[in-house]
Amino acid sequence: MTKIPKVSPSTLAELKTNILTLRTKLEQIEYLSVVILDLQDEDGRWVTYGEEYEKNRANCEEHIQEMTVFAKNKIKNLGGRPIKWIKYPIVSSIGHYNEVKESFKDDGKLQEWVKWLLSNIEHHVRKSSSFLERTFNDRVLRQLTLDSTDKGEEYQKFVKRWGDAQNLDDDFEDYLVRQLKILSLGMPITKKENHELSSSVEEVSSGSYKPHTLFIAHEKQSGEKRGNAWNKLKLLASESKGENQVELSGYGKLYLKRDREKPEAVVMYNHSKFESPSDGKLVTKGAFDQAWTAEKSSKKKENL
């Protein structure tokens, strides 16, 4: 997905430059629509121009009018705005997910929704504390803004949804991974299973349903050897390079890359493109080997 530029261009030339960084028509329409909203808002104008807006308001208003007319015409030329800004509901917690999930009568569509949620989650390291944050990406946040405006949503409710979308719990992402595993196996998710999933965060966090463990389960079932499976994972990481989405057997689509310092011993994965060196989660050769052994032990217990 294209990294959408920041809003608040101050001139038409800057706005046109920003548009060139967006690859699809829909991304351009979304960006231009948010720009229009921002330019119409008094606070948004202050964010864009600062004190200059007070000192030279007439000149700023001229830029605003010029950009607004251009943006509206550009959206029209691109085919107009979509009927809905957001393809799927945005949820930010396990409880909210379980509430909305009941509206999906088709497991196939439910699976696509879970994949969509995971593919739009990004990881960032907070500079002040080196704390890893999980948030929905910029594009989803823009879609959330546009959807809220269309619906006339109460401002305080929108602010809460916006904040929640930028502060996702580790447990929530792991829970979605486990849900995807169950759906990919064609297993119906009953209320009993939901209760078990909600009360088994510890099991999820332990790594039982991480991408590499699901990949291991698939490879062992196919009769693959451990060394060959690890080499296959590295090969996929080399193919992805953190930029191209690849299909990981037993799990689904994601982004992989090999660690620069330890390319033979460490593979990294992420559900969105790698934007910085701190993005993604590590899978070491040691962790892979331990998961392989654990999978073997688990199968033995099941056969007892």
Image (tube, helix red, strand yellow):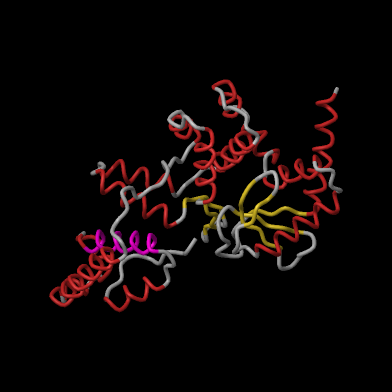
Q: Tell me if 70 is positioned left or right of 6 in this view.
A: left
**Is residue 52 found inside the magenta-colored segment of the image?**
no
Q: Relative to 289, is 256 on the left or the right?
A: left
Left or right: residue 81 versus residue 213 is left
From the top left corner, tell me how far across and down residue 193 is, in percent: 59, 24
Residue at the spot 32% in from the left edge and 76% down from the top edge = 14
Which quarter shows the C terminus? top right
Which residue does the image show at 66% across and 45% down from the upper left?
251
Q: Compared with residue 203, is residue 41 higher up or lower down, i.e. above or below?
A: below
Q: Residue at x 20, y 69 (%)?
A: 69
Dominant secondary-structure state across the stretch colored magenta: helix
Q: Is 26 part of what is drawn in magenta?
A: yes
User: In the rendered image of this protein, does residue 74 appear above or below residue 167?
Assistant: below
Residue 140: percent from left, percent from top? 42, 52
Left or right: where 128 falls relative to 294: left
The picture places residue 112, in percent across and down from the top left corner, at: 52, 42
Q: Nearer the viewer, residue 27 or 3?
A: 27
Q: Residue at x 81, y 38 (%)?
A: 294
Which quarter of the picture shows residue 33?
A: bottom left
Give the extent of the magenta segment.
25-39
Instruction: Point out residue 146 in the picture as x, y percentages from the top left corner.
Output: 31, 52
Count of number-bearing discs: 0
Q: Which of 26/89 is in front? A: 26
